[in-house]
Amino acid sequence: MGPNLLNNYGQVIAMLMFVIGFANLLFHKNMIKKIIGFNIMDSSIYLFLAQMGYIKSHIVPIATDGAASVDQYINPIPTGLVLTGIVVSVSVTALMLSLCVRLYRRYNTLDLDEITTMLRKEGR
């Protein structure tokens, strides 16, 4: 392990979280588990963006005691992107969960293999 890996542990954790979420999305057949994997992937992207926007020696861009140099502030754009992404993620999760409720009411299961089998029997 090099010195860059230890200095960038937040990005490494974000990448590991993304891989865990992606594996969860690929290997589970239950729709709820797939939604959880999708949310883990979302969270890893937000962590990665927050880590990339943070600069160790800089401060939050809130002017309290007069105007300070722009070079002392952290870039607020990644934080805004993370907040916007969280709002979109909550909306997408709500939509996916509502579709899961509709699937369960129709097929009495959330297993994708069983739903596919039932669809083939129906002729769709």
Image: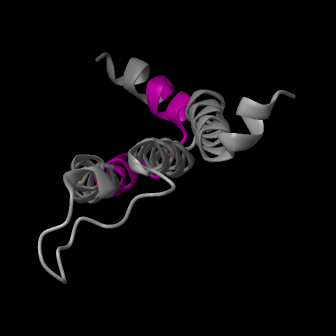
Does the rendering let one see residue 74? Answer: no
> Looking at the image, which is closer to me, 103 or 23?
23
Does the rendering let one see residue 67? Answer: yes
How far from the left and from the top, in percent, is residue 22?
A: 57, 31
Q: Residue at x 79, y 33 (%)?
A: 3
How far from the left and from the top, in percent, is residue 55?
A: 45, 50
Residue 25 in magenta stretch: no
Q: Quadrant of the C terminus?
A: top left
How far from the left and from the top, in percent, is residue 114?
A: 54, 33
The quadrant in which residue 60 appears is: bottom left
User: In this image, 76 relative to 8: left or right?
Assistant: left
> Looking at the image, which is closer to me, 41 or 71?
71
Q: Residue at x 62, y 43 (%)?
A: 17
How far from the left and from the top, in percent, is residue 13?
A: 66, 44
Q: Which region of the structure is painted magenta?
A: 100-117
> Looking at the image, which is closer to me, 88 or 77?
77
Q: Residue at x 29, y 47 (%)?
A: 78
Q: Residue at x 57, y 48 (%)?
A: 33
Residue 107 in magenta stretch: yes
